[in-house]
């Protein structure tokens, strides 16, 4: 099982926002911190904002901040929001054409494993995985108004 890059970036973006405390973060600085595409992070931020995990502040000095306390953001909720499905094998997906459907015992084992995975993620919150600002390689972002900073529209 492997999570999508979208989910990976969503979790990293939330970790970065949590490390910033009350300071607003931008897409550009987050992309620099993780060396990932700004375009992809815009989509991630949009999804997280619509779900209330992030809050967008518009304007020239705008940016993103957590939409909830880190203790209120369960990792399982973020993963369920950002993963398209948990179809580990063909028989879990719509359009299943496996000839073993109905007699296969593997699907029950994998279904139990997927449920355990989600249960484990639900036991942890963003507060449990939060890092300090200095833990991010890119270092502190430039002050507002300096070249290279971009605020959300």
Image (cartoon, helix red, strand yellow):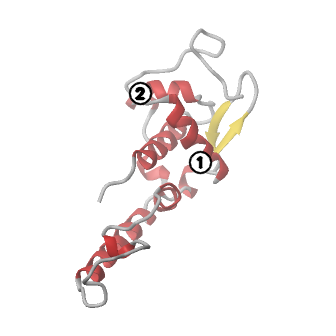
Which residue is rendered at x = 37% and y = 25% of the image? 137
Question: How far, Cα to Cα, is label 1 from label 2?
Answer: 24 Å
> Which residue extends farthest top?
147
Q: Secondary structure under badge 1?
A: helix
Please tell me how crowded label 1 is: few (under 14), some (14-19), or many (20+) other residues with Cα within 10 Å: many
Q: Which residue is mark 1?
A: 48
**Place of residue 131 in the rendered image (x, y in percent of width and height, measured from the top left):** 42, 39
Q: Which residue is mark 2?
A: 134
Which residue is rendered at x = 44% and y = 27% of the image? 33
Q: Quadrant of residue 43?
A: top right
In the image, 72 versus 33, the foreground residue is 33
Residue depth check, mark 1 versus mark 2: number of the one nearer the observer: 1
Q: Quadrant of the N terminus?
A: bottom left
Q: Quadrant of the C terminus?
A: top right
Which residue is rendered at x = 43% and y = 30% of the image? 36
**Place of residue 40 in the rendered image (x, y in percent of width and height, measured from the top left):** 50, 36
Relative side of 113 to 143, left or right: left
């Amino acid at each position: 099982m492997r999570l999508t890059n979208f989910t990976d970036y969503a979790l990293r973006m939330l970790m970065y926002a949590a490390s910033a405390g009350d300071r607003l973060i931008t897409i550009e600085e987050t992309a620099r911190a993780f060396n990932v595409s700004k375009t992809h992070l815009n989509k991630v931020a949009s999804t997280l904002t619509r779900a209330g995990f992030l809050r967008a502040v518009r304007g020239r000095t705008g940016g993103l901040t957590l939409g909830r306390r880190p203790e209120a953001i369960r990792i399982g909720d973020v993963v369920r929001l950002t993963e398209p499905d948990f179809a580990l094998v063909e028989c879990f997906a719509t359009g299943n054409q496996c000839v073993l459907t109905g007699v296969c015992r593997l699907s029950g084992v994998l279904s139990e494993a997927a449920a355990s995975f989600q249960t484990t993620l639900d036991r942890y919150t963003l507060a449990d995985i939060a890092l300090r600002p200095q833990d991010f390689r890119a270092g502190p972002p430039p002050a507002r108004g300096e070249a290279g900073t971009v605020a959300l529209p």
